[in-house]
Amino acid sequence: MEHLHLKTAAFHTLGCKLNFAETSTIARQLTGAGYQKVNFDEPANVYIINTCSVTENADRECKFHVKRAMKANPDGLVVILGCYAQLKPEEISAIEGVDLVLGAREKFNILSYLDDLQKSENHGIIHSCEIDEADFFIGSYSIGDRTRAFLKVQDGCDYKCTYCTIPLARGISRSDTIENVVKNATEIAQKGIREIVLTGVNIGDYGKGEFGNKKHEHTFLDLISELDQVEGIERIRISSIEPNLLKDESIELVAKSKRFVPHFHIPLQSGSDDLLKKMKRRYLTGIYTNRVAKIRQVMPDSCIGVDVIVGFPGETEEKFLETYNFLNELPISYLHVFTYSERENTEAAEMEGVIPIPERKRRNKMLRILSEKKKMAFYETQLGKTLPVLWEHENKNGIMFGFTENYVRVQKPFDENSINQIEILKLKTILADGTVSVFPAFEEFLAKI
């Protein structure tokens, strides 16, 4: 209990990069108010769990981490926030050990709730707005390690995809001001961090709600044009952007940029136009094909990642094969495969044509195998090329890892002096673990052992 004579706080984050950015911002608020940050399994005065509603086991995960906190310090205060807290505050407040549940609006005002908070005997206290009231923007960024930072530029979503609870959990689409994004990016650069990853719920919608109104003062193109001028950042990566919002002008700017890297992650969700309509996506496969073709035309070596959902209601075997064949023929680099699961208060949960869970799992496995093939084929096109590699801090059994600008994962013998450094190296061989060795460092290492 050596920490407890100080005010101490521990944090655990579930879910997306946006959550990590927000947890970091809340942690900086607490440290600014005199709290010392400690590891989650250590004794602390306050445990803050930032939850996710997208994962299938949100309830189980939340309970598991509350138990961890109670094990570390039975008298510690447990605060739950994030998407799951906004959607299910009553359920969460009934979990044994939970003292406070904060909604989308309240989480950034956490300090005012902590002052008088006592350990709960029964239910935790809930402070949660109606999601319609979440119409403000809090700029956030996270620094998980010394190599990269996640910078939040946008929050919420105005799309009404039939499978998704995010608009219910995060509210309407709204954006940070360009001035504030640039200020945060400059702060990150001054900390010696080499790479920024732009995050948001729907970042292609950037500009909406920038000054508290719904009209676009700026666009995503304006944002990336400004960020391209920020001194001191070597790399800027766009996390995920809707195909209908990824315009030719943005692709062309990335192609010419010295800072934006040739890596795009573009949600598809289905290769069947019928299912895209049922999902209420705002594009059909033709637009998606065009986006990929445009990227390949101006950046032949770019990495293109794809989100896809299997087992959506009405996904017959024929429609699944449409998706499989569409992806198989498309010049993409990897897939993130999600198995559809029903969500309360979504249209899809009421749809007919429910796919049995074992079949959903089979389809997921088929696409994950396809993803591995795509990734290996992409890596093979990069062998022999000389590319800049940014090395990360992890030491895994004497090996360190890094990424090229176009997201090829490489490895070499661990060298502390290489952490957070960029080296120009030749990609040599795809190794058994799916990473790529670099020349000449790997050969020198093997010669020594």
Image: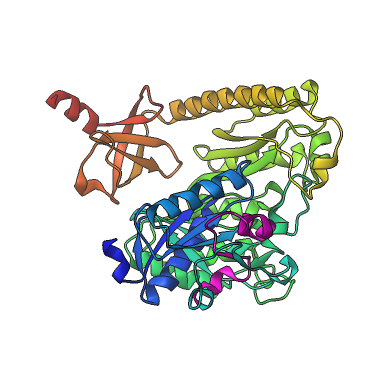
**Front residue (pair 306, 49):** 49
Residue 96 appearing in the image: yes
- The image position of residue 71, as x and y in percent, is 41, 51
- What stretch of residues is rendered in magenta? 84-111
Asked whether residue 90 is drawn in magenta, I would say yes
Quadrant where the image shows the C terminus: top left
**Front residue (pair 293, 416):** 416
- The image position of residue 322, as x and y in percent, is 75, 25
Extreme residue in the right direction = 352
- The image position of residue 319, as x and y in percent, is 78, 26
Q: Is residue 56 above or below residue 191?
A: above
- The quadrant where residue 156 appears: bottom right
Seen at 66% across and 29% down, the residue is 327
**Front residue (pair 134, 63):** 63
Q: Is residue 237 left or right of residue 53?
A: left
Asked whether residue 342 is drawn in magenta, I would say no
Q: Is residue 50 left or right of residue 410?
A: right
What colouring method underlies this structural image?
A: rainbow
